[in-house]
């Protein structure tokens, strides 16, 4: 996220995956982004473990970094 010049608050994304017409996985993430500091990118997770299990945090971080770099399905 080296190109973020100013803080951006309330960035949100929703993802729903349909699995054969039965519904499936759903995610809604809201983030406040700030330019990285001298130590690089840091991600804080204030969500309770039952709301965002630690195992999913890597996927959220990867998606945020991809979106910040202008890739992925951002805005779709």
Image (cartoon, rainbow, N blue to C red):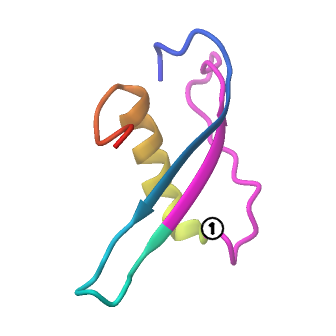
The residue singled out by tag 1 in the image is 52
Q: Residue furthest bottom?
A: 22
Q: Is residue 2 above or below residue 42?
A: above
Q: Is residue 31 left or right of residue 18?
A: right
Q: Observer-nearest residue: 31 or 45?
A: 31
| Magenta highlight on residue 37 | yes
Which quadrant would residue 65 be assigned to in this image? top left
Q: Residue furthest left?
A: 20
Q: Secondary structure at mark 1?
A: loop
Left or right of 50? Residue 63 is left
Which residue occupies 27% across, 87% down?
21
Q: Residue at x 56, y 25 (%)?
A: 40
> Does 46 appear in magenta?
yes
The residue depicted at 59 percent of the width and 67 percent of the height is 54
Span of residues in magenta: 27-52
State left or right for residue 52 relative to residue 19: right
């Amino acid at each position: 996220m080296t190109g973020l010049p100013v803080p951006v608050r309330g960035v949100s994304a929703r993802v729903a995956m349909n699995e054969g017409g039965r519904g499936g996985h759903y995610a809604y993430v809201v983030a406040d982004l700030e330019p990285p500091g001298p130590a690089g990118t840091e991600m804080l997770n204030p969500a309770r473990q039952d709301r965002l299990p630690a195992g999913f945090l890597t996927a959220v971080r990867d998606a945020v970094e991809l979106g910040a770099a202008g890739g992925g399905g951002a805005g779709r």
